[in-house]
Amino acid sequence: MAVTDPIADYLTRLRNAMRANHRVVDIPASGVKKEITKILFEKGYILSYKFQEEGHQGNIKIALKYDKVTKSSAIKDLQRVSKPGLRKYRGSDSIPRVFERFGNCNRKYFKRSNE
């Protein structure tokens, strides 16, 4: 099955796995999805990940992170803002500055449950 929006598919698979309280989720791999996964790991939103190069495309195996006490997911809200059918554009003056190779816009779209 062809996916027209692979990033939305990635986010939906994560969201569905978190709602079902799964510990691990498998997602078809791509370059963009691998980079998003690395960012989520560096920011502490997922427990671990593993890239599996099998077949034509490969898979990303992501271990989801949950709070030990409340058992709630580390990611509270996950949504795609700019979509292929509805692009959201911003002026250059409204784009956040990047410090030490990390943009602070990641925090805006991936919220932890303790915030």
Image (cartoon, grey):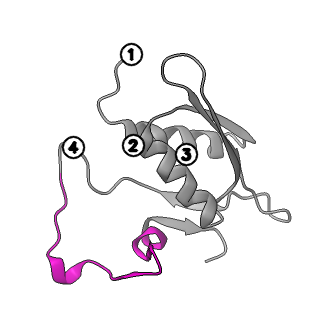
Q: Is residue 95 magenta?
A: yes
Residue located beneath label 3 in the image: 15
Give the CA separation, mark 2 to mark 3: 12 Å
Dot 3 crowding, Cα within 10 Å, few <14, some 14–19, many 20+: some
Q: Amino acid at mark 4?
A: Pro
Residue located beneath label 4 in the image: 84
SS for dot 3: helix
Do tag 2 and tag 3 residues touch (Cβ < 8 Å)?
no
Magenta span: 87-108
Q: Is residue 90 magenta?
A: yes
Q: Amino acid at mark 2?
A: Ile
Give the CA separation, mark 2 to mark 1: 15 Å
Image x and y of residue 46, in percent: 66, 55
In the image: residue 26, left or right of residue 69: left
Residue located beneath label 2 in the image: 7
SS for dot 2: helix
